[in-house]
Amino acid sequence: MSAGPKVYDVLAQTVAQEEVKTCFALLGDANMKFATRLAEAGTRMIYVRHEHCAVAASLSYARKTGDVGFATVTCGPGLTQLMTILPAAVRASLPVVVFAGETPLKSAWYNQAIDQAPLVTATGAAYHSLHHPERMPAVLRDAFLQARLERRPVVVGIPFDLQNLAWEGASDLPVPSRQLIPVVSPIPPHEEDLARAAELVNKAKRVVVMAGLGAVEAGAGPACRALAKACDGLLATTLPARGLFHDDPFSLKVAGGYATNVARACFAEADLIVAVGVSLAHHNADGGKLWPNADVLQIDVAPRTTSQGRVAAQHHLRADARLGTEALTFAIERRPASWRSADLAERIISSLPDTREFPEEAGVHDPRDVVAALEAVLPADWEMVNSSGHCAYFAAHMPSRPQEKFMTIREFGAIGNGTSFAMGVAAARPESTVVLFDGDGSLLMHVQELETMQRHGMNILIVALNDGAYGSEIHKLRSEGLDDTGAVFGRTDFAAIARGFGLGGETISDLSALPDLVADFGKTGGTAVWDVPISDHVSSPGMARAYPPRAAAE
């Protein structure tokens, strides 16, 4: 007679019933039996080399699929490794569930014991400690429901001695969370709010319609275009929504610290910004400097006045991003094109993001030239992942890339997440090729995940913009006239490292070789790292504004 199921069997069945297609995992005593059973239930398991990377990959997976990301880690040190990535998930409003073990209750002492709940809740994530076996399936199900409804990470901690108990509860699993989500329709605007918003637009002389991820999720792109055209306005996006209007002649592209010179000039003329599905972040407004003469009308289901230490919006239209924008377009007075001129369209399309000149340096490339060369040859259907750090500015300006092929998560300002985010996108879009643009400092933080990519057969091309340093720090230190030694490390040979992992590795000394390299990679697939030595003297425009080069400052 076979033994009955264990608690970990039922917990794995509960997660499988949630239709979790992919789990990012690093196994230990407190989660390995659960994870093994989950794999046997048909969930694709991606076994990473660091717990941080498991949860980080689940973030980009959630962003790309629109579903809940799922990861599992062990107790104690496995859990404490998550303290950097959980705040990013919270601030990016990403639904993620983490199955974390807890140390055994029966042990008087255990060397991995730590009070896990305060650590997790300090990040803004939710934590549930499950100590009653018969309640565990329902609470685990509820974690998925909470993540979906609150759009934030939920960590479930379960002592592994309780997981090993024989299951004595009900044979039926709880109803999956998908069946408990309230069925609600998009919120239309109230007629009085709509009338006030229409009056604002009618009185404004220069309007910029700016879309965020809320507009992307609501399918409000066409409505934003129609509104801008109706009021003789221009278009722009936040960085995460970059590419939503990539083919529109009157799109200023990215707003905020990454805005081009043309965009900054147009924003300076604006007297009204219509922010559609935008969280009104500090960087999006460049700290309030991007539109010094404009008020902000926010269209959102949860409007807010202040954001990240500043008054971010003066006017509000509470509504679904698409319905609110469509209604506003219908309510305003049409005006003939004036700002939207052929001359302005030509300026937008022909102007480079950054026209500053830097001396040529032997053996290294201008990062702007690298990105332009890749923009010309990378297939349009390849997925692009933009990491964080100083070099991220350059890769963000690839005008032909639509929003659905672009991904960035950087709400916590941490570098080192690029490899994980690329893995999450590759898992979400296994039929696609993923291109990760990362800096050398960021890539080295979790370079061990190259082995994960190789082992799982992921199609990821990593372009390492290698300045041999922490880019942001060297420019800041030099601007202050301080020694930059602590931020300069030398140019790591990433091509050799990649080959050591059994991957493709190239050092790009000649940009003219890129077309052939791209074509060859498109045929072979797999994972490869292209090490591109770049100048450490070319700063991004935003960096130069905040920290002028020393010679200019003096």
Image (cartoon, rainbow, N blue to C red):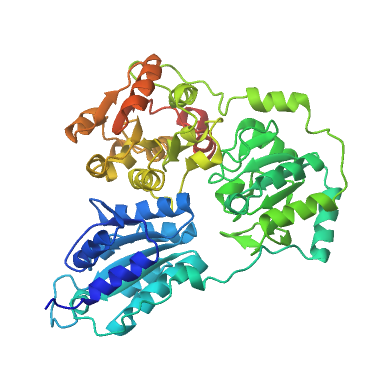
Q: Position of residue 509 (x, y in %)?
A: 32, 18
From what the image shows, is residue 320 above or below residue 257? below
Q: Position of residue 276 (x, y in %)?
A: 67, 52
Q: Position of residue 260 (x, y in %)?
A: 60, 33
Q: Going by the picture, which residue comes out furthest to the front? A: 1
Q: How many marks?
A: 0
From what the image shows, is residue 316 above or below residue 362? below
As rendered, which of 223 and 360 lies closer to the eye? Answer: 223
From what the image shows, is residue 4 above or below residue 432? below
* Residue found 82% across the figure and 64% down from its top: 191
* Residue found 31% across the figure and 81% down from its top: 171
* Residue found 31% across the figure and 67% down from its top: 99
Q: Is residue 163 visible?
A: yes
From what the image shows, is residue 158 above or below residue 69? below
Answer left or right for 495 relative to 148. Answer: left
* Residue found 51% across the figure and 34% down from its top: 544
Q: Is residue 411 visible?
A: no
Q: Position of residue 448 (x, y in %)?
A: 23, 44
Quadrant of res 445? top left
Figure quadrant of the N terminus: bottom left
As rendered, which of 68 and 249 lies closer to the eye? Answer: 68
Answer left or right for 465 relative to 542. Answer: left
As rendered, which of 311 and 417 lies closer to the eye? Answer: 417
Answer left or right for 427 relative to 79. Answer: right
Quadrant of res 73? bottom left
